[in-house]
Image: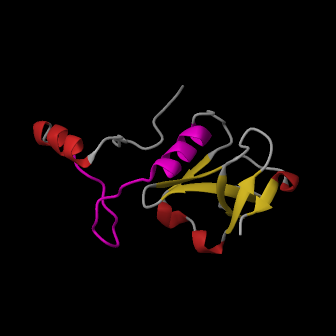
């Protein structure tokens, strides 16, 4: 059974004026804000495309985390150079619930997803 990863959250790709127009007509819609700055979270197209590419595989071995559940500062920026996730970039780090380190793709302030185990030969460090 497919279930939403993030309950009650809709990602919208539109210009700010269009979002404002729709939001003015549907009063229960709210922006998600960064808890540190209080600013609306705007996800860059590259980050959203990466997230869609990874989660759209419906891989059973993906692990999802709230942003504050992982210490992303301890990760090493890497690129996957083969396999199902070829071309994806993320942070290589140890995550709870997994025996080995995983590549993590993050949507800043919203969610992080740890990929299935990727063989070290398929990972290169991004400078």
Residue 95 is situated, as x and y percent measured from the top left of the image, at 66, 61
Say which of 40 and 15 sits in front: 15
Residue 126 vertical placement versus 97 (above, below): below
Q: With 52 as the anchor, is 41 left or right in this view? A: left
Name the residue: 59% across, 74% down: 73
Magenta extent: 28-55
Q: Position of residue 11 (x, y in %)?
A: 37, 42
Instruction: Work out whether 84 lies above or below 71.
Output: above
Residue 77 pos. (x, y %): 68, 65
As rendered, which of 110 and 78 lies closer to the eye? 78
Compared to residue 114, the image places residue 21 above or below, namely above
Residue at 51% across, 51% down: 47
Residue 71 seen from this side: no
Identify the image quadrant of the N terminus: top right
Q: Quadrant of residue 55?
A: top right
Q: Is residue 45 magenta?
A: yes
Determine the image quadrant of residue 14: top left
Residue pictured at 66% horizontal, 69% vertical: 75
Q: Is residue 119 visible?
A: yes
Question: Does residue 70 belong to the magenta stretch?
Answer: no
């Amino acid at each position: 059974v497919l279930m939403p990863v993030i309950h009650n959250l809709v990602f919208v790709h539109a210009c700010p004026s269009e979002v404002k127009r729709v939001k003015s007509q549907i009063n229960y819609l709210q922006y998600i804000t960064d808890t540190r700055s209080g600013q609306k979270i705007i996800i860059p197209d590259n980050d959203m495309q990466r997230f869609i590419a990874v989660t759209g595989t419906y891989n059973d071995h993906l692990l999802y985390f709230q942003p504050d559940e992982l210490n992303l500062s301890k990760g090493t920026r890497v690129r996957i150079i083969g396999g199902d996730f070829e071309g994806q970039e993320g942070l290589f780090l140890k995550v709870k619930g997994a025996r080995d380190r995983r590549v993590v793709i993050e949507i800043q302030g919203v969610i992080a997803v740890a990929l299935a185990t990727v063989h070290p030969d398929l990972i290169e460090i991004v400078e």
